[in-house]
Amino acid sequence: MLSAVDPVTFGQNLILLIGALVLLGGALVLLVATWRGVKVLLALRAGRRARKAYLRAARRADGVCYPPAIEGTCTHCRRADRRIYFPSDSLEELCPRCYERYWREVEAGTLIPSGANRA
Ligand SMILES: [Zn+2]
């Protein structure tokens, strides 16, 4: 049976088959590398977004960290909130809305902090 096959045609077919396998392997490697690259880019973008969200939640608009906070009641507006801030330069316990007004007034110089330093 094997003797009936033309050796030149067999060799050409074999080289063609090996070439096709090499091309398929190369295409597979390229596909996997592209997929991994896309996943890395997506992970980097998600990391940047998470970092921005964290900084937005942990820092004021001027870049300073928010003071420590726990759940409680605001001493200024008497509203309960999940985050009540304890400014280090005031004895008041402020909700996010009142604290936002408070630090902006302190920064602008229109409000002088009255409390002792808690730190
Ligand atoms: Zn308040």
Image: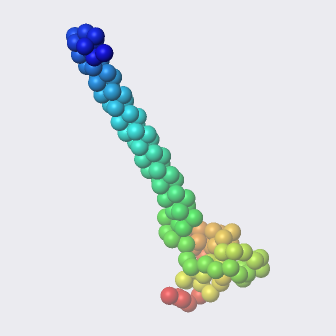
Quarter occupied by residue 16: top left
Q: How is the image coloured?
A: rainbow
Residue 90 appears anywhere in the view = yes
The image shows residue 18, relative to residue 69, as above or below, that is above
- Quarter of the image for the N terminus: give it: top left
The image shows residue 116, relative to residue 17, as above or below, that is below
Q: Relative to the observer, which residue lies in front, 86 or 9?
A: 9
Q: Is residue 43 left or right of residue 90?
A: left
Q: Is residue 117 left or right of residue 95?
A: left
Q: Is residue 59 left or right of residue 37?
A: right
Residue 41 appears anywhere in the view = no
Q: Relative to the observer, which residue lies in front, 75 or 41?
A: 41
Q: Is residue 7 left or right of residue 35?
A: left
Name the residue rendered at 66%, 78% in the picture. 84
Quarter occupied by residue 24: top left
Name the residue rendered at 60%, 81% in the picture. 86
Name the residue rendered at 40%, 42% in the picture. 37
Residue 114, given in percent of the width and then of the height, sits at 60, 85
Q: How many marks?
A: 0
Name the residue rendered at 22%, 12% in the picture. 7
Q: Residue furthest front?
A: 1
The image shows residue 48, relative to residue 71, as above or below, that is above
The image shows residue 45, relative to residue 31, as above or below, that is below
Quarter occupied by residue 34: top left
Residue 99, given in percent of the width and then of the height, sits at 64, 73
Residue 53, given in percent of the width and then of the height, sits at 55, 59
